[in-house]
Amino acid sequence: TMEQGNMQLMLPQHFMITQEMYYTIHEILNCKRTGIYKKMFLEARSIELLLLQLEQISTPEDQTSLSKYDCEKMHAVRDFIEQHIAESYSRIDLAHRFGTNEYALKKGFKEIFNTTVFGYWSNLKMQNARKLILEESLHINEIALTVGYKNPRHFSTAFKKHFGHTPTELKNFMKR
């Protein structure tokens, strides 16, 4: 039982740890706050992690208008995106790669994951970039290339739009 330190599963299947979950776990493990602020921070991040897990299991395929086969295609597209984060593919390329058409991919992906294909891809790139800034001593240009931006200025603009601050501002803040 859980009281004895044994793991318990909420569901019979295992779910992947998403980039967002990984980042939240990283923040929990590397919290530098102390006292009441640390307690508040850890509680907030724990609730956020629970929310992410619940969101992951609260969109079962049987509540979608897609067939099981089409749902599997959308999950395969998502997995492909996660494995090829720094590469570029058009929606039509992805659709053909997974045996569907552009409209079905656009509609199906949005229905299952509640975001667009490129919104998901962009969010992954930004989360990965933020993780690299926080954990690695790479130059911003290197990080931009790593997450698939050929132009560091475009990367910085996208990063600022996503997080509200530039990669350099985050890097300088972390040096304090």
Image (tube, rainbow, N blue to C red):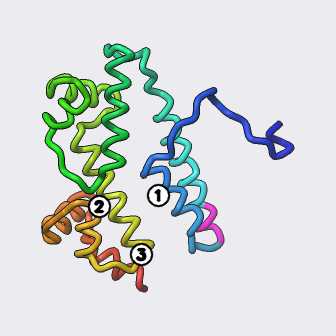
Query: What kind of residue is marked 3?
Result: Glu
Query: What kind of residue is marked 2?
Result: Phe
Q: Nearer the viewer, mark 2 or mark 3?
A: 3
Mark 2 and mark 3: Cα distance apart in space: 19 Å
Which image quadrant for residue 91? Answer: top left
Label 3 crowd (10 A; few <14 / some 14-19 / many >=20): few
Q: Do tag 3 and tag 1 residues touch (Cβ < 8 Å)?
A: no
Q: Label for residue 136?
A: 3
* Residue behind mark 2: 163
* Residue behind mark 1: 23
Earlier residue among tags 2 and 3: 3
Name the side, left or right, on which 103 lies relative to 80.
left
Q: Which residue is pictured at 18% across the width and 30% down the height?
A: 96
Residue sitting at the far right: 4
Q: How many marks?
A: 3
- 17, above or below 129, in the image: above
> 61 or 164, which lies in front?
61
Q: Which residue is pictured at 33% across the width and 41% down the height?
A: 80
Asked if the magenta segment contains residue 136, the reply would be no
Query: What kind of residue is marked 1?
Result: Tyr
Q: Residue 46: horizontal and vertical position, in percent?
A: 58, 51
Q: Secondary structure at mark 3?
A: loop
> 82 or 62, which lies in front?
82
Q: Residue 57: horizontal and vertical position, in percent?
A: 50, 30
Characterize the magenta stretch by its predominant secondary structure: helix
Q: Residue 165: horizontal and vertical position, in percent?
A: 26, 68
Which image quadrant for residue 14? Answer: top right
Please provide the residue range marked out in magenta: 35-39
